[in-house]
Amino acid sequence: MSEYTDRALARLGDRNPFDVLADTPSRLEDAFWELGEKRLDKSYAEGKWPARSIFAHLADTEIVYAFRIRQALAADHPTVQPMDQDAWARRYGNADVALALELFRALRYWNLAVLRTLTDEELARPMLHPERGEETIALIIGLMAGHDLGHLEQLRTIAAT
C-alpha cells in the first residue's frame, strides 16, 4: 500500500466508511457556515491550501472517484488516470465555494446511491492506479472516507483560528 493509502485508512480507523461518506455533506455545510466568507481564504498552516481550495478540491475529487468507480464497474481491470491535485488547485483561487459544496453534495449522494447497490463481487473489482498499484472499489470507498476526514479536520483547524 502507498503512504497516501495508509494515511487515509488510518484516519478512517474502524468507522464505517458508508457512514462517513453519508455524513460528510452536512459536515461540510456546517463548516462552510462556521467559516463564513471572511475565513474562506485562510489556511490551516503555512503553505497549505485555504478553505476555499479545500472545498473546490473535494468537489473535483468526488468527480474523480465517481469516474474511477464506474470505470471499474464497466471494464475489466482498467488503468485509472492519476490526478495532479496541486496543478488542479492552481485554478481554485476564485472558486465559488457554495457551488463547489452543491456539486459535492449532489455527486456524493449519487455515488452513494450506486455504492449501496454493489455486491461483494462488484466491491472486489480491481483497477490499476499507476502510482499506488492495484485498488478495488471497496478500497476506494475507504479512501474516500479517509480523504473526507482529513479535509474536515483541516477545515475545523481553520475555523478554530
Image (cartoon, helix red, strand yellow):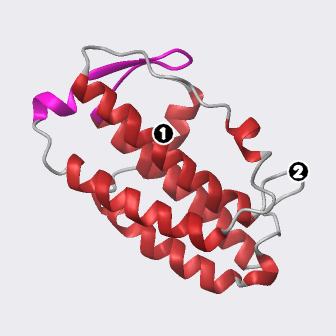
Say if residue 16 shows up in the picture.
no
Report the residue at 79% width, 78% height from top.
39
Q: Mark 2 points at which residue?
A: 47
Front residue of this view, candidates 60 and 135: 60
Report the residue at 29% width, 20% height from top.
126
- Do the residues under discs 1 and 2 have CB atoms within 8 angstroms? no
Amino acid carrying label 1: it is Val
Amino acid carrying label 2: it is Gly
Neighbor class of circle 2 (other Cα within 10 Å; few <14, some 14-19, many 20+) is few
Q: Please say whether residue 130 is one of the residues in the magenta stretch.
A: yes
Measured as percent of width and height from the top left, residue 48 is found at 81, 52
> Which of the numbered marks, if any, corresponds to residue 64?
1
Question: Magenta segment, which residues?
Answer: 120-137
Vertical relation: 41 (above or below) 37: above
Q: In which quarter of the image is residue 131?
A: top right
Vertical relation: 43 (above or below) 71: below
Q: Please, what secondary structure does the residue beneath circle 1 have?
A: helix
Report the residue at 67% width, 38% height from top.
85
Q: Quadrant of residue 34?
A: bottom right
Marks 1 and 2, Cα distance to the nearest angstrom? 25 Å
Q: Which of marks 1 and 2 is in front?
A: 1
Measured as percent of width and height from the top left, residue 118 is found at 14, 41
